[in-house]
Amino acid sequence: MEEIQKNEYDLLIDKSTAVQKGWKKVPAPKRGNLIRIFGLKLREHLNELGKGVTMESKKPITEGIGEVQEAIDMCDFAVGLSRQLYGLTMSSERVNHRLQEMWHPLGVVGCITAFNFPVAPWAWNFCLAIVCGDSVVWKPSPKTIKISYRCKEIFDDAVNDYKSKYVDSLGIDPKDLLLILEGGNDPAVWLAEDKKIKLLSATGSCEMGKSLAPKVAARMGKGLYELGGNNAAIVTQFADLNLAAKAISFSVIGTTGQRCTSLRRLYIQKNIYSAMIGKIKGQWSGLAMGDPLDKNNILGPMISKEAVDKMQKVIKRARMKGYDVWGGELAKPTKAPKHEEHRENYVLPCLIEPKNNVHDEDLAMAETFAPIVYTFQYDKLPEAIEMQNSVPQGLSSCIFTEKLNEAEQFISAVGSDCGIVNVNIGPSGAEIGGAFGGEKDTGGGRESGSDAWKQYMRRTTVTINYGRELNLAQGINFELTNNQPDGK
Ligand code: UN1
């Protein structure tokens, strides 16, 4: 990988700043037209792009295509939104006054994305930023750089279709609305420290977020962080165990446990513990694993040898503590493509049962980006909720129960402390319509649906006096006395 130099970076940001100056003048519904064309192009290239995601991230092809679908959904959402960037009108306390909010474009948005989801989180940010009148400098993971450039190519193609119709008179080239910044840590730090980056949106580990956030804060910049999860499921004695087992399997095995939403902790009511674990183990024997491009396989390799080593180290530590470990071995699927350099990176999903429900700092309290799930037993629901909330991260959570009061308790103020709270669904696989993100060390950001768009705009509070008197708020009396020579 060629490292970009700081002066090249500065030129890139200048380019992005220049295009945004013109773009913010384009009416929002017309900005939406560009994303509409882009969404249609993504549809044409769905399978090809899905394959591209799979080739680099190694996730199964159905998930690769699913991720591009998520980007298409995001385009549709953003097009609708381009006509709905509403501000409120409030009642003024003053006579003959109007009080309202307006939302204006923010500027250049920096967007850092990770290898495991190279397209969808970028699209959550990009589609909103574009309709909101911003430009985007995208720093993708170096591991998935090819698919990022392919997305940019398709966007540029959409720009060509769009250009003559809408923006020729502004003298800007909307191609520059999306610029790719290659590199690792240095460019990420430059983005964090750069005053010209009006919003830095970063997806990745808690460590990454914690190192960048103070740099953004030091310049009073805005940050949007979607960092590590350490997601849990609670299975109560009133759960449909078959539904729970399938959902749990998807959340552990999907993307080979390398989602920020992957399931990492499982709290099972003690009376159904053995039955539940038995069902999960049953589902995990003879999993279809191998070439992720083969649609019959649901388990592909991990991203790298380093990731496999980290997983194996964690399993070793758990064994040393005398915990019960099931699965997690390195696997050699016969159907793995021969030429594939990732042949060695296949693993089996793993269940670890810590002794006496202990949550070790370096095991259950930490996020290992691998298909490992820690299992715990509980008696009463509040106990399970307390354990699930006891970790530093707060992204996603779920409960399996058919009992209304249990479900309600879980989603209530005394329930899960996560940003995403599901009932009878696993913690992963969110759709774009809701705001996506989490609390605590997960960073507090919200992306994609609901009102996440507001972060890509700046709010102005406007007060208009349409009378002839100066009425002051809070009933303040301001009468100019005449003992001054009245400016003469
Ligand atoms: C991530 O792993 O960073 O909810 C994103 C999900 C996906 C997004 C995951 N829609 O699992």
Image: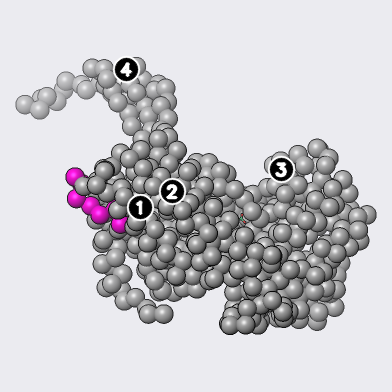
How many numbered marks are there? Answer: 4
* CB of mark 4 near ligand 1 (< 8 Å): no
**Secondary structure found at label 4:** loop
Q: Is residue 290 above or below residue 406?
A: below
Residue type of the residue flagged with mark 2? Leu
Residue assigned mark 2: 40
Residue type of the residue flagged with mark 1? Ala
Between label 4 and label 2, give the one nearer the viewer: 2
Q: Nearer the viewer, residue 76 or 309?
A: 76
The mark that comes first in sequence, 4 or 2, is: 2
Residue assigned mark 4: 96
The residue at the point 70 percent across, 59 percent down is: 251
The mark that comes first in sequence, 3 or 4, is: 4
Residue 297 in the magenta stretch? The answer is no
Task: Find out whether the residues at labels 2 and 1 contact each other: C-beta distance under 8 Å.
Answer: yes
**Secondary structure found at label 2:** helix
The residue at the point 6 percent across, 26 percent down is: 488
Where residue 438 sits in the image (x, y, percent)?
59, 53
3D distance between C-alphas at marks 4 and 1: 47 Å
What are the residue bounds of the magenta stretch? 169-175
Residue type of the residue flagged with mark 4? Asn
- Please give the label number shown on residue 158: 1
**Is residue 82 in view from this perspective?**
yes
3D distance between C-alphas at marks 3 and 1: 42 Å
The mark that comes first in sequence, 4 or 1, is: 4
Q: Is residue 262 above or below residue 144?
A: above
Residue that protrudes farthest toward the right in the picture = 271
Residue assigned mark 3: 411
Task: Find out whether the residues at labels 3 and 4 contact each other: C-beta distance under 8 Å.
Answer: no
Where residue 346 sits in the image (x, y, percent)?
68, 77
The residue at the point 35 percent across, 52 percent down is: 158
The mark that comes first in sequence, 3 or 2, is: 2
